[in-house]
Image (cartoon, rainbow, N blue to C red):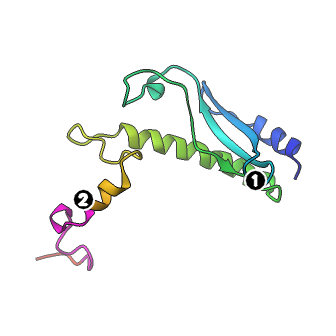
Amino acid sequence: MRFHEMEDIVSAITYRPGWSIILDHDPMQGGGRPYIQISVSIVSEASLSPFTGKREAWKSGKHYLSYHMCRQEIVGAVFGAIRAAEEHEMKEWFAYKGARIYNPHLDPDALAELARYRRNFDFRENAMTMEELG
């Protein structure tokens, strides 16, 4: 598949107002490897940063494509990128007792430290067997 064919496919995809799909080349990845990226520009609740309290435009991570992909794979990659962006937002906004416990920006070293202690685990007595108790 050629880049202009990818452009035709991606340009036929729409999602929410203010959400767009960027298709570009990454010169740092093999001299121009194609990628897609989700860009959200509309000022809405989704663009309100839970960290700064300000409304900000944002972009998702890059999702690399291959010139060997077929149309269905390109469309599926865009769908997956949108799903990942939505899930990222959901993880940022979901809170338990006022804390964003699934926040994707939590420091993995801090999480590793938390996971070292048995007292931080919560599970059912029959979690492994799934047998009903008495």
Type of amino acid under label 2: Leu
What residue span does the magenta drawing correspond to?
A: 114-130
Element type at mark 1: helix
Closer to the camera in the image, 72 or 49: 49
Horizontal relation, residue 99 to residue 21: left or right: left
* Predominant secondary structure, magenta span: loop
* Residue receiving disc 1: 72
Q: Residue at x 53, y 41 (%)?
A: 85
On the image, which quarter does residue 82 sit in? top right
Q: How many other residues sit within 10 Å of disc 2, few (<14), some (14-19) or many (≥20)? A: few
Q: Is residue 70 left or right of residue 103?
A: right
| Most foreground residue, 73 or 134 | 73
Question: Left of 91 or right of it: where is 1?
Answer: right
Label 2 sits on residue: 114
* Disc with the residue nearer the chain's start (1 vs 2): 1
Q: Nearer the viewer, residue 72 or 96?
A: 96
